[in-house]
Amino acid sequence: MAKPDSALSTTRRRHLQWEAMLAIVLVVSLVAGRVLSPLFLSGANISNMLADFTEIALIALPMTLIIVAAEIDLSVASVLGASSALMGVLWHMGLPMPLVIVLVLMFGTLAGLFNGLVIVRFGLPSLAVTIGTLALFRGLAYVLLGDQAIADFPASYTAFGIDTVGNTFLPMPFVLVIAGAVVFTVVLQATPFGRSLFAIGANPTAAQFSGIDVAKTKLRLFMMSGAMAALAGIVYTLRFTSARGDNGEGFELSVIAAVLFGGVSIFGGRGSMIGVLLSLVIIGVLRNALTLADVSSETLTIVTGALLLSSVLIPNLVARWRAAREKRLMAQAL
Amino acid sequence: MMTRHSPTLPAMPPSDTKRESLAVSIAKSRELTLFIVLLVLIGATAAVKPDFLNLQNLRDVLLNVSIIGLLTAGMTIVMLMRHIDLSVASVVGVSAYAVGSLFVVFPHMPVIVAMLAGIGIGLAIGAVNGALVTFGRVPSLVATLSTLYIVRGADYAWVHGGQINATSLPDAFASIATGALFGVPNLVLIALVVLIALSVYLKQYRGGREHYAIGSNPEAARLAGIRVDRRVMIGFLLSGAIAGLAGVLWLARFGTVDASTAKGIELQVVAAAVVGSVAITGGVGTIAGATLGALVLGVINIALVVLRVSPFWQQAIQGALIVAAIALDTLLARSVARRMMRKRDHG
């Protein structure tokens, strides 16, 4: 017999199942990586592996919240590029680095606010709006910097992009990812704001009537997304010591792939930060292991696509098979 | 019902109705609005730079827009049903390279075989997309984002930095882009035929109307006996086939293709559809509108070049215009809806 809370626990159980599956995939890919290359678990390699997905991870954190609320932000990679270009321009204007960083973060927040305002005020689908601002912000990046690159950032700052924490293998920028992961996990999973995102994603009208300020919440979400994309732009610029207009082009799809592979429903209302974090680590580990095994980057693209696809397809097919079996059993019982 | 309402009809002042219905029909016909925007764009550019209106520019616009316009039409059919096909650019890339390599192996392959090969490749990928969405119940955004990656990855793995050059292509094939009938480039004619066929299908045929029904209300469409899965499958097959054909046309137009051919144009295509007032929420849109959307974006592109706007500004301006177009379109649609509501309440 169904218990009163069965609906809730089914969703929760499905999450746990997905997270357990991701954990198994992670362990398998770690073992496979070790078998493929003895270098795989060396400190230097782990350091590389972590550093390589800093930007994707930073952007994926707010993207998880946005997709849970049944919206999407395709403009993130362009905000990253524009932030990188702005950083170079401001530095060349002779501003001190701390001020440059603050201004770039403010720019990102404003870019997000712009997205949010257009979406909320006109009641437009975020997919359509952010496709437009994807072009707009990337264009802004080229307006700011053209096709030049600015590389003469102060060594004390670029060191941040390359150094590790003390004598450990932890790359400096990764500290930001850890801090961000903690903050965003708490926000999504343990605050009224986070709970309201699930409500909005499941049914925006019902959420509105239950007293949630949907418009304000969405505005905040897109501002967060812009700010984090700008932060990713700063890290990217320092890590590669190069401010360029085309930095991070195409990242938006990798970010969305990581979030969806983490078990977040594209229709909103379902998902967990733990799943997304696991998914980010898996994608990082797999890419690194395959690179060490001399698998071409082309194959990596195929693997990303296959992972994303299987993350939705396999549970659906299993559900289909279960439903068919239950039907058969019912028929037999009659 | 009829008898109860008919006495009120003569009471309405005929001149007023006529004027109102004209205003409403202009606002309602998004195609007409877009057409006016297009004329204004051309007129304004020509006013600043009279040499804008030359045959070479016109030819360039038409050739560029034909390929994007075809893809936009395919995307429209999919978007009508609340779906999206992000894999089109990858299909164009792989189809262009595959047909190019066929020409390297069989230099005397007839043009029609080349086209069928491209369409076949597109149909195969479209079938995979359709199966994922209908049988696998994978949201189309996820399914086609995955096939975008997988097809492009396979393309890179296969091509490996290789390139097909115009010298490998027979003259008969190149004449798709260079040849013309009555001054209209062949490529444009091909696109026009396909666009008209699709437009007739969507307007006149039961199957075409079903795409709209599914997008307006999938559940109602199902209850009305429409085989939704079959229709969605056909939509993805059409979008795939068109992308395959577009790949062949791309090869004919540019001559040189490699693994990164057409990379990223899926967003341009979605943008053209949205500017052409195809609703991303389904149920609304026409091939004519989508084509006009592609034309507007294409004309803007060329106009910016002619006006000597720095190429670095072009993308920013285009982005701003897309956002403005979407916002304007929504406002317009809402004011029409409001006026019709008022008319219903007080009329």
Image (cartoon, rainbow, N blue to C red):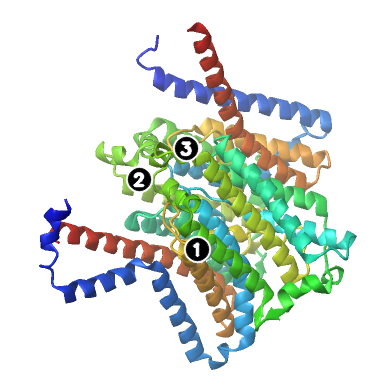
Q: CA distance from mark 2 to mark 1?
A: 37 Å
Where does the image place residue B217, in percent across and percent down from the top left? 39, 44
Mark 2: which amino acid? Thr
Question: Which dot, 3 or 1, sits closer to the camera?
Answer: 1
Q: Are marks 2 and 1 on the same chain?
A: no
Q: Residue furthest top?
A: A333
Q: Quadrant of the C terminus of chain B?
A: bottom left
Q: Mark 3 vs mark 2: which is more N-terminal?
A: 3
Say which quarter of the image contains residue B250.
Answer: bottom right
Q: Residue B47 location, x and y as percent?
A: 48, 91
- The kind of residue on which mark 1 rests is Ile
Residue underneath mark 1: B287
**Few, some or many residues within 10 Å of mark 1 (<14, 14–19, 20+):** many
What residue does disc 3 label?
A183
Q: Which residue is mark 2?
A: A217
> How many other residues sit within 10 Å of disc 2, few (<14), some (14-19) or many (≥20)?
some
Q: Is residue A312 above or below residue A320?
A: below
Chain letter belonging to callout 2: A
Q: Is residue A209 above or below residue A110?
A: above
At a point 57% along the width and 47% down the height, the residue shown is B234
Q: Is residue B314 above or below residue A151?
A: below
Badge 3 amino acid: Val
| Residue ID at (54%, 33%) | A263
Identify the image quadrant of residue A315.
top right
